[in-house]
């Protein structure tokens, strides 16, 4: 089997795919369109499936050392009352690891460090990837072209390559929610490792980090494209009556550090994650809402599964067929579950519906939260041989 691959996109999924391919003997070039890796971004929670994927890629220990376990927390109402508690110790007993929280930029740096020097090329704008006449794939850039035995399209929710490979697919659609997020400038005193608070058409959450700082996010029902001159002031007014530590988290944040993105997802499932010798991965294949915290974890699963298939199957075509068969049903099911979780969680706005949801959560058995997490996080990666 030939061993030359191009990965389009230098995000978490693309870097993870490159690591997996390098570990199984492939020569890999990662093309990232951003001219500079600015290490921006907020925080991320990694469930057991994501951690296990990182273990398979050989970077799990480094990520654990930089992350903070989420042993305490859960879901609250705006007045501070608990709707559901999270037992991270019970998750650790079940899965071998609790959920962990880490700044996205730190995770990205750890993944980059696991790649050979010179593997990642920045400022590379890929315009297309098409099968050539020699069983290879021609990758066209704005200033040239490359050929490879395999192309991994990890170019995000707005994937240009996905649109070219599946021109009849409607592409990503707006979910109805927008998210504002940031990392605090300095440490904040927090009683829990992780929290979500659900109000009417709004969610506020935090992830605590090892250095005492925290990531917070605010998800709001909103028309697409709405932006604010001073987002922090808008959020202070929106969440003025919500419980501590929400005001403290906002007060510990610089106004210019707030990121604001509308949430888009692939509501219409793709008919395949592959086309010829091109594989779609991560958000390019199955962009989902963040309600289950599984977006990055599913991309990490993709990366390990793809590398394992390519390492064990006799041909690239057979490996990609296996990758599609193993990843498409699972990731699309997780995407559907995430969409449903959002509709029953943050997006609910009618007072009666919110009251019914909150009552149901309070009355649920203590193990219900654990079982809900296990449904998606209990995944065993294939071995990379």
Image (cartoon, grey):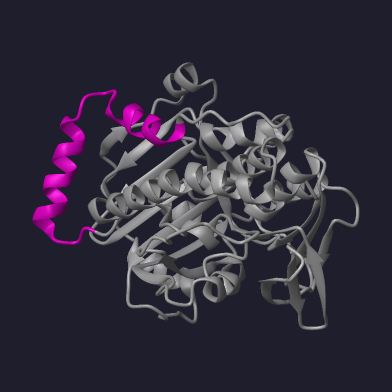
Residue 55 lies, in percent from the top left, at 67, 31
Residue 244, visible in the rendered structure: no
Q: Height in image: 366 above or below 40? A: above
Q: Height in image: 213 above or below 122? A: above
Between residues 376 and 97, which one lies in front from this camera angle? 376
Q: Residue furthest front?
A: 133
Residue at the location (34% across, 61% down)?
240
* Region of the chain picked out in magenta, as a range: 348-377
Between residues 132 and 204, which one lies in front from this camera angle? 132
Horizontal relation, residue 349 to residue 226: left or right: left
Q: Report if residue 267 lies within the magenta region.
A: no
Secondary structure, magenta segment, majority class: helix
Q: Quadrant of residue 134?
A: bottom right
Q: Residue furthest top?
A: 93
Q: Residue furthest right?
A: 117
Residue 221 lies, in percent from the top left, at 30, 67
Residue 9, visible in the rendered structure: yes
Between residues 55 and 39, which one lies in front from this camera angle? 55
Residue at the location (33% across, 77% down)?
223
Horizontal relation, residue 43 to residue 347: left or right: right
Q: Report if residue 370 lies within the magenta region.
A: yes
The C terminus is located in which quarter?
top right
Q: Height in image: 91 above or below 269? A: above
Residue at the location (48% across, 77% down)?
167
Horizontal relation, residue 174 to residue 51: left or right: left
Residue 360 lies, in percent from the top left, at 15, 38
Residue 111 lies, in percent from the top left, at 74, 46
Q: Height in image: 346 above or below 236? A: above
Q: Quadrant of residue 238?
A: bottom left
Residue at the location (39% across, 46% down)?
334
How many discs appear?
0
Horizontal relation, residue 30 to residue 51: left or right: right
């Amino acid at each position: 089997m030939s061993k030359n691959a191009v990965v389009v996109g230098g995000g978490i999924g693309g870097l993870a795919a490159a690591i997996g391919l390098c570990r199984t003997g492939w020569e890999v070039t990662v093309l990232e369109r951003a001219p500079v890796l600015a290490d921006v971004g907020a925080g991320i929670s990694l469930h057991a499936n994501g951690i296990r994927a990182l273990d398979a890629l050989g970077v799990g220990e480094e990520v654990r050392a930089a992350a903070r376990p989420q042993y305490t927390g859960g879901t609250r109402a705006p007045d501070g009352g608990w709707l559901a508690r999270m037992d991270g110790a019970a998750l650790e007993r079940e899965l071998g690891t609790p959920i962990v929280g880490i700044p996205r930029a730190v995770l990205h740096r750890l993944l980059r460090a696991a790649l050979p020097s010179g593997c990642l090329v920045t400022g590379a704008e890929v315009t297309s990837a098409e099968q050539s006449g020699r069983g290879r794939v021609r990758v066209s850039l704005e200033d040239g072209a490359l050929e490879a035995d395999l192309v991994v399209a990890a170019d995000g929710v707005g994937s240009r390559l996905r649109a070219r490979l599946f021109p009849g697919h409607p592409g990503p659609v707006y979910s109805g929610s927008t998210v504002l997020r940031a990392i605090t400038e300095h440490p904040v005193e927090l009683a829990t490792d992780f929290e979500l608070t659900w109000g009417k058409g709004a969610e506020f959450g935090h992830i605590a980090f090892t250095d005492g700082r925290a990531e917070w996010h605010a998800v709001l029902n909103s028309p697409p494209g709405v932006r604010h001159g001073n987002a922090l002031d808008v959020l202070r007014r929106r969440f003025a009556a919500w419980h501590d530590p929400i005001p403290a988290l906002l007060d510990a944040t610089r106004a210019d550090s707030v990121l604001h993105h509308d949430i888009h997802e692939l509501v219409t499932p793709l008919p395949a994650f592959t086309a010829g010798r091109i594989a779609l991965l991560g958000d390019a294949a199955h962009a989902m809402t963040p309600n289950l915290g599984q977006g990055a974890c599913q991309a990490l699963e993709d990366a390990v599964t793809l590398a394992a298939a390519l390492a064990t199957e006799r041909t690239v075509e057979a490996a990609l067929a296996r990758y599609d068969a193993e990843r498409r049903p699972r990731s699309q099911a997780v995407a559907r579950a995430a969409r449903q979780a959002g509709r029953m969680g943050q997006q609910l706005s009618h007072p009666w519906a919110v009251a019914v949801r909150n009552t149901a959560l309070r009355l649920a058995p203590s193990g219900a939260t654990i079982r809900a997490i296990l449904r998606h996080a209990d995944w065993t990666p294939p071995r990379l041989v």
